[in-house]
């Protein structure tokens, strides 16, 4: 499903529409409209933190002065002021992932695709980055599609939770709001566990 939304593969049947457009057939339409945060930071080791954030802006032919201002601004928002000229090897895992998030936000995409972006981090760093990411998504009015294998993470950050059975069949769907009770959340967790157990048994 991630690859279909990103326009990397074509659905084997039916059609996929993202903001009213086919991401596979209209790939160019989505230029600059989708940002991706990977499981690993995917930073270029020969580029500084600033230059890594600049990459997407350069691909989009953004005015160089404006691009630098934007990149610096996002690094600052993610707590990396003073690290602009550091290379990835000099940054911690959490800091590198912050650069990756800054790179995704810098191009001002409508949609963020996130492939388990915090799974390789220690729990405290992951918790802090998770909260920061959710805050940025909401503040900037973005839509984020977030892949995770952790039920608690999905329920913590999501307002719509989908459980898939292979290859891309929706087996369960639930919505959460600020008013969702602890009892409803507990039932949802149990329902997800049951659906996942069925998939594993199959």
Image: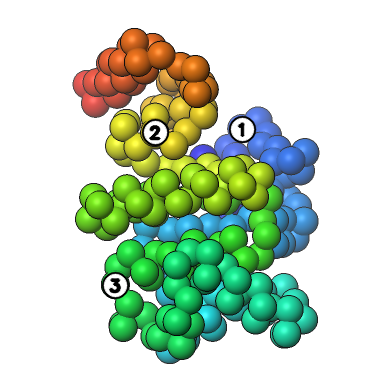
Which one is in front, 72 or 164?
Answer: 72
Residue 130 in the image: above or below residue 181 = below
**Mark 3 or mark 1: whose residue is earlier in sequence:** 1
Q: From this viewpoint, is residue 7 visible?
A: no
The label on residue 13 is 1
Q: Look at 69% across and 41% down and name the residue there.
A: 18
Along the horizontal axis of the image, is 21 left or right of 83?
right
Count of residue discs: 3
Q: Say what secondary structure mark 2 lies in.
A: helix
Which residue, given by chain and number where applicable, does mark 3 sit on?
92
Q: Specify the quadrant that holds the C terminus.
A: top left
Q: Foreground mark, 3 or 1?
A: 3
The label on residue 156 is 2
C-alpha gap between disc 2 and disc 1: 33 Å
Q: Say what secondary structure mark 1 lies in.
A: loop
- Residue 70 found in image quarter: bottom right
Crowding at mark 3 (Cα within 10 Å: few <14, some 14-19, many 20+): few
Q: Foreground mark, 2 or 1?
A: 2
- Residue 121 found in image quarter: bottom left
Residue 149 in the image: above or below residue 36 = above
**Mark 2 or mark 1: whose residue is earlier in sequence:** 1
Along the horizontal axis of the image, is 41 left or right of 53?
left
């Amino acid at each position: 499903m991630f690859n279909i939304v990103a326009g990397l593969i074509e659905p084997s049947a039916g059609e996929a529409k993202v903001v009213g457009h086919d991401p596979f057939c209209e790939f160019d339409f989505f230029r600059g409209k989708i940002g991706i945060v990977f499981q690993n930071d995917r930073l270029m080791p020969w580029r500084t933190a600033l230059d890594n954030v600049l990459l997407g802006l350069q691909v989009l032919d953004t005015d160089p002065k404006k691009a630098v201002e934007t990149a610096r601004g996002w690094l600052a928002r993610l707590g990396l002021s003073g690290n602009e000229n550091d290379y990835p090897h000099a940054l911690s895992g959490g800091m590198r992932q912050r650069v990756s998030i800054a790179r995704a936000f810098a191009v001002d995409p409508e949609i963020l695709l996130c492939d388990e972006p915090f799974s390789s981090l220690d729990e405290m760093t992951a918790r802090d980055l998770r909260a920061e990411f959710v805050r940025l998504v909401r503040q900037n009015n973005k839509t984020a599609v977030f892949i995770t294998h952790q039920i608690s993470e999905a329920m913590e950050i999501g307002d719509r939770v989908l459980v898939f059975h292979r290859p891309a069949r929706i087996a369960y769907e639930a919505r959460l709001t600020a008013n969702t009770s602890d009892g409803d959340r507990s039932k949802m967790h149990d329902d997800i566990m049951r659906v996942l157990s069925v998939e594993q048994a199959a």
